[in-house]
Image (spheres, rainbow, N blue to C red):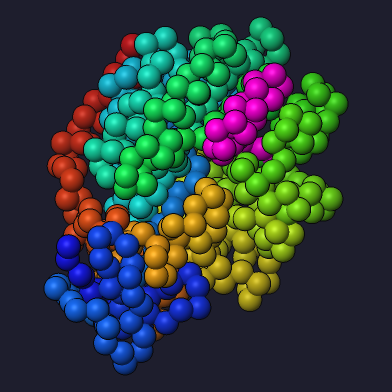
């Protein structure tokens, strides 16, 4: 068993108040010691890794994505549309997704995230056309092969256009099928690997694509197995209008009525809540995933992060699906969070460290994980190390602020569970050129069939 000392970092953000100015000691994939300013490790060291040029962060954690959408980035028919018409344009294209295309989209999205410093991903996959019934198995195998931590959410759509929903008939499933597959996936993958890589959550897609029955049944199944629940909520005013018209309730009242307002639930977006709803979310400790780029691209609005946090709700960060962002770069998303929140709050009310906290400790809380998201003794050795060696950083003073303000986008080195996954800005697990070639072929095929 090797004892590794990552020593003398140029700067380090622990996401807590601990001093790790002179580095971190890692044994068997776990952080065993923080070395304070001017100190030396107490452990006997086998290997040293000089981080004198690196700004060290806890591995970033993405809490909302749709990997398959990397195949439909910047898609001409969907450009410059708001959420509902944007979805209706893309559903028929997504309905043609094949297992091979889904695999390569998952791999590309995960590697893209990894290269940006992300070590844990959550994907919301709700598309199960015929022949793609094993979509989550494909994602689980890809995550295990890459050695990335993943919360895979078994999404679902059960309310098609003919029943008053938004998606076409070709992409919805019966409730029986959804629930049987959800239970199978929990039993097969949730916390089944020794390295803590895989978790499973249940994720009916949104109020306008599933029935209340599947929301209630998913909540009951999640309670039985103590897994988390995830969905889109309060993303747009159109959604508020839909819920009032169909259910006679605002989205949060609907969520409460179907048994979801508790601390095992996290919600993507969470923009259009009123004061009273924010207090209820806080009291329930329901998590919110802030997706700034997607909210800006689709002109959805601005999440009220500070009010949510003050009320007690955990808030994390997500890039959202790559057809509405359209990148999967979590470090860029940290900067986007800072910029969009500065439009809502005073400059000192949302800082660069607040933005970094969202993507680390905040995201870990949103996923219900206490083993990641911070640099602290006993946490998993998931790290993102950035160099300030590009023209955009030249002349920068505070190294940590520079990462966010100058716009870091590429990690120099990334470690997951003590294993290096990226070094010298290169993915060590495969050939990125070959992966991009396979991915772009799959994207072209999707549009040609
Ligand atoms: Zn989404």
Residue drawn 37% across and 47% down?
196
Q: Nearer the viewer, residue 171 or 312?
A: 312
From the top left corner, tell me how far across and down residue 153 is, in percent: 49, 33
State yes or no: residue 228 in magenta: yes
Q: Is residue 408 left or right of residue 338?
A: left
Q: Nearer the viewer, residue 405 or 226?
A: 226
Count of numbered marks: 0
Residue sitting farthest toward the bottom = 38
Q: Is residue 310 left or right of residue 224?
A: right
Q: Nearer the viewer, residue 186 or 73?
A: 186
Residue 307 seen in this snapshot: no
Residue drawn 43% across and 35% down?
190
Q: Nearer the viewer, residue 419 or 402?
A: 419
From the top left corner, tell me how far across and down residue 276 is, in percent: 84, 50
Q: Quadrant of the C terminus?
A: top left
Q: Is residue 298 left or right of residue 282?
A: left
From the top left corner, tell me how far across and down residue 413 is, in percent: 24, 62
Rendered view: 193 above or below 400: above
Residue drawn 65% across and 47% down?
263
Q: Quadrant of residue 435?
A: top left
Residue extent of the magenta highlight: 212-234
From the top left corner, tell me how far across and down residue 292 is, in percent: 55, 51
Q: Main secondary structure of the magenta part?
A: helix
Residue drawn 69% across and 9% down?
163
State yes or no: residue 118 in magenta: no
């Amino acid at each position: 068993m090797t004892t590794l000392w990552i020593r003398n970092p140029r700067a380090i953000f622990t996401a807590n108040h601990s001093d790790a100015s002179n580095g971190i000691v890692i044994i068997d994939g776990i952080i065993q010691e923080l070395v304070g300013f001017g100190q030396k490790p107490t452990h006997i060291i086998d290997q040293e890794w000089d981080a004198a040029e690196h700004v060290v962060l806890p591995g970033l954690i993405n809490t909302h994505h749709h990997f398959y959408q990397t195949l439909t980035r910047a898609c001409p028919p969907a450009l410059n549309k708001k959420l509902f018409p944007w979805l209706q344009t893309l559903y028929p294209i997504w309905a043609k997704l094949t297992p091979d295309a889904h695999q390569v989209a998952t791999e590309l999205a995960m590697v893209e995230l990894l290269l940006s410093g992300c070590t844990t991903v959550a994907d919301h996959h709700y598309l199960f056309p015929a022949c793609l019934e094993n979509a989550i198995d494909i994602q689980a195998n890809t995550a295990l092969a890459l050695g990335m931590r993943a919360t895979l959410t078994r999404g679902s759509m059960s309310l098609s256009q003919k029943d008053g929903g938004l998606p076409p008939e070709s992409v919805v499933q019966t409730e029986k099928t959804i629930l049987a597959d959800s239970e199978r996936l929990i039993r097969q993958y949730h916390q089944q690997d020794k390295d803590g890589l895989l978790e499973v959550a249940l994720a009916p897609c949104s109020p306008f694509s599933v029935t209340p029955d599947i929301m209630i049944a998913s909540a009951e199944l999640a309670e039985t197995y103590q897994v988390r629940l995830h969905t889109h909520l309060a993303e747009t005013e159109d959604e508020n209008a839909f819920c009032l018209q169909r259910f006679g309730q605002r989205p949060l009242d609907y969520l409460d009525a179907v048994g979801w307002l508790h601390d095992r639930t996290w919600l993507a977006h969470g923009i259009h809540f009123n004061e009273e709803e924010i207090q209820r979310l806080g009291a329930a400790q329901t998590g919110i995933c802030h997706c700034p780029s997607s909210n800006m691209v689709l002109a959805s609005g601005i999440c009220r992060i500070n009010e949510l946090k003050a009320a007690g709700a955990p808030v994390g960060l997500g890039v959202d699906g790559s057809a509405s962002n359209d990148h999967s770069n979590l470090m860029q998303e940290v900067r986007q969070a800072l910029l969009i929140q500065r439009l809502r709050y005073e400059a000192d009310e949302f800082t660069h460290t607040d933005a970094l906290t969202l993507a680390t400790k905040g995201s870990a809380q949103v996923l219900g994980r206490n083993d990641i998201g911070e640099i602290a003794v006993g946490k998993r050795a998931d790290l993102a190390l950035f160099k300030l060696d590009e023209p955009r950083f030249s002349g920068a003073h505070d190294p940590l602020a520079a990462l966010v303000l100058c716009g870091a986008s590429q990690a120099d080195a990334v470690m997951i569970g003590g294993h290096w996954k990226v070094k010298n800005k290169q993915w060590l697990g495969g050939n990125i050129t070959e992966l991009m070639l396979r991915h772009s072929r799959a994207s072209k095929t999707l549009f040609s069939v």
